[in-house]
Amino acid sequence: MTLLQVRDLSVTYPGGVSAVRGVDLTLEAGQKLGVAGESGCGKSTLALALLRLLPAGTRTAGQVLLDGEDVLGMRWGRLRAVRWAGASIVFQGAMHSLNPVHRVGDQIAEPLVLHGRATAAAARTRAGELLEQVGLPAARASAFPHELSGGQRQRVMIAMALACSPRLIVADEPTTALDVMIQAQILRLVESLVAGQDLGLIMISHDLAVLADTCDRLAVMYAGRVVEEGPASEVYENARHPYARALSAAFPRIGDPASRFAPAGLPGDPPDPSALPAGCAFHARCPVALPVCAADDQPLRDAGDGRRAACVHVTGVPDADGGGLPSENARSTP
């Protein structure tokens, strides 16, 4: 069953900053979708747009259909009812998202009371149950955020997101500030919760390896656009788009000496969203760019095996080298 459909979503900040450009995504109930890309590629803006949490003056276009209802067209009262109860978000940086002067149990209980799901007393009891569900003792409900570790605070954020039993959870870099052991625990926790409650999950990260290990499907964003989308393991192991390939190559493979001793990288930075270049936004950094790439932006094309990629080299019939891409040494100067 289709839970979320994002159709031709565009987000423009004041001053003509095009942060998201024509994004199309679909998420089924019980499915985990990863969204990857460098900083400044539009991932967090996409997350905020799904629940209309963008600042005043921001222009949005397209549709965000949650169970068939357009979030972008909702009246304020309906939108308020949908937030937390229909869809919730785990923000990046738990310490900055939790109120430092309120106990974490009260913060978990607040949406339950505001949405009429429980009385104040019942909400406090439920807060303890939610903490236990995410692997913390119910007694930690009386703690203030500064009394918890980074991993514990992140678990509190997940408990808050689950409080009103939403069908969709958006997790924006939920493990960025955590050490690898706690990161692994949080990721396994999220996976078990999604599977056990048939939720839809959108997980946003710059770490392709984490998303490939956690998610069913993966969308790679660059300069506000999705440039490749498909099964997570396939995109990670054999990307069709040169940018997705570069992201994947930046992570050394365990047991692969070549990637360990000579890790690949990608020179330069994503373009300024307020001054995007003509043609494909990636062409200036692309090792296989053609003259046409500087003139024409490339639409998402069928790349075979249930995948799409926005690259002129993609023919829809992947070859042994991966989607028809020439070797990275065979660059043509635009």
Image: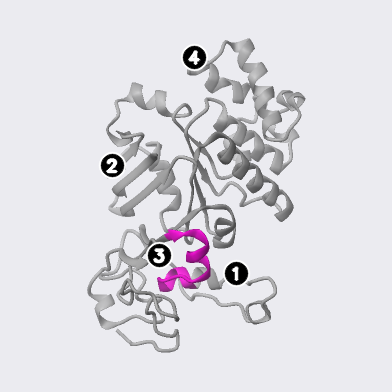
Which secondary structure lies at badge 3? Answer: loop
Q: Amino acid at mark 2?
A: Gln
User: If you read the primary sequence from the N terminus, does the residue marked by circle 3 or circle 4 appear first?
Assistant: 4
| Mark identifier at residue 63 | 2
Extent of the magenta region: 230-245
User: If you read the primary sequence from the N terminus, does the residue marked by circle 3 or circle 1 appear first?
Assistant: 1
User: If you read the primary sequence from the N terminus, does the residue marked by circle 1 or circle 4 appear first?
Assistant: 4
- Can residue 136 be seen in this snapshot? yes
Residue 266 in the figure: left or right of residue 333: right
> For mark 3, does the 10 Å Cα neighbourhood hold few (<14), some (14 to 19), or many (20 or more) residues?
few
The quadrant in which residue 230 appears is: bottom left
User: If you read the primary sequence from the N terminus, does the residue marked by circle 3 or circle 2 appear first?
Assistant: 2
| Mark identifier at residue 116 | 4
Which secondary structure lies at badge 2? Answer: strand
Image point 26% across, 82% down: which residue?
291
User: What is the x, y in percent for residue 287?
Assistant: 41, 81
Q: Nearer the viewer, residue 189 or 145?
A: 189
Which is more foreground, mark 3 or mark 2?
A: 3
